Image (tube, rainbow, N blue to C red):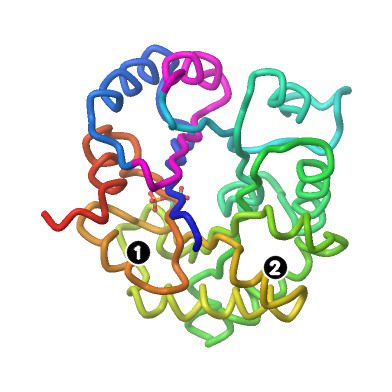
Amino acid sequence: MRTPFIAGNWKMYKTPSEAETFAEALKKQKLPEDVRIAIIPPYVDLVPLKEKLKGTSVEVGSQNVFYEDEGAYTGEISLPMLKEIGADCVIIGHSERRQYFNETDGSCCRKLRKVLRESSLTPILCVGEKLSDREAGEQLMVVSKELRADFSGLTEDEAARVVIAYEPIWAIGTGKTATPDQAEDMCRSIRGIIRDLYSDETAESIIIQYGGSVKPENVKELMEKPDIDGALVGGASLIPEKFAAILDFKSEA
Ligand code: PEP
């Protein structure tokens, strides 16, 4: 039985005081007990958010991590830093980092190994195709190539701890959601690739999220699909009531 996992990626939104206001508002909402929840804010919000959410089940994660412990790497954040502040999870390879900050499958792979071998943080690995890939019918080839490169060298125990977020790039921040069938097709194929690389057991236990314009209006239909175990939510995670409505996807209302 896979526990649903819904994470909010705040991208470069919210100052520390805005993050605290969000946490206060979220705490007033009724949060489901059987859903794993995380908020992934900008770095400066991590400590105040962690503090404000103490005593709740809401986890806090980082939007990136570097693969060296320390050094002359201006602008980067390290795993020891994230461990010391008690971060629970970390996004690796978000398409915005791949597009604007030269993130490659090579660096994603190094970051994944680092996180899995030296911490208990959950890595959320993002993969997904561009619109031109989908129009050319090459979406599965692109995602398969990314996954195989990013997972390269991981043992089965390590691989089982990765959360995979399938995020078609054309659906991120555009208001265009993949249809539930398109999302399910790819998530099922991703599970198949994990089966191919490892085993049935790991394929059946690994958590696969869908991301791309998820909102209260479409989350239920997406989450009803058998291979979609959660969501990585951008824009709609910035408003506490909207995020809570997404977390409440099981309710009949
Ligand atoms: C994201 O940032 O990972 C994302 C899916 O954004 P949005 O929900 O805004 O499309």
Horizontal side of residue 109 vs 64, given as left or right: right
Residue numbers of the magenta segment: 33-55
From the viewer's perspective, is 194 left or right of 44? Answer: right
Given the image, on which type of amino acid does mark 2 rest?
A: Leu
From this view, report whether residue 179 is shown above or below residue 67: below
Q: Circle 2: is it few (<14), some (14-19), or many (20+) Cα within 10 Å?
A: many
x and y percent of residue 151 in the render? 77, 63
Read off the residue under disc 1. 223
* Quadrant where the image shows the C terminus: bottom left
The residue labelled by disc 2 is 147
Name the outermost residue toward the left.
253
Work out whether mark 1 precedes mark 2 in sequence or the reverse, and give the earlier one.
2
163 to 29, vertically: above or below: below
Q: For the residues carrying marks 1 and 2, which lies nearer the camera in this image?
A: 1
Image coordinates for residue 83, horizontal then vertical, percent: 71, 25
Q: Is residue 174 above or below residue 181?
A: above
Q: Is residue 44 magenta?
A: yes
Q: Secondary structure at mark 2?
A: helix
Distance from the alpha carbon under mark 1 to that under mark 2: 22 Å
Question: Total label count?
Answer: 2
Indicate the quadrant where residue 202 lies.
bottom right
Which amino acid type is marked by label 1? Met
Is 102 in front, or is 15? 15
Pick whichever, 212 or 80, lies toward us: 80
Q: Residue 33 or 86: which is nearer the viewer?
A: 33
Kindly identify the residue that appears in the image at 52 percent across and 78 percent down: 188
Above or below, comparing residue 104 to residue 100 in the picture: below
Q: Magenta span has 228?
A: no
| Label 1 close to label 2 by CB (< 8 Å) | no
SS label for mark 1: helix
Q: Is mark 1 within 8 Å of ligand 1?
A: no
Residue at (49, 30) in percent of width and height: 41
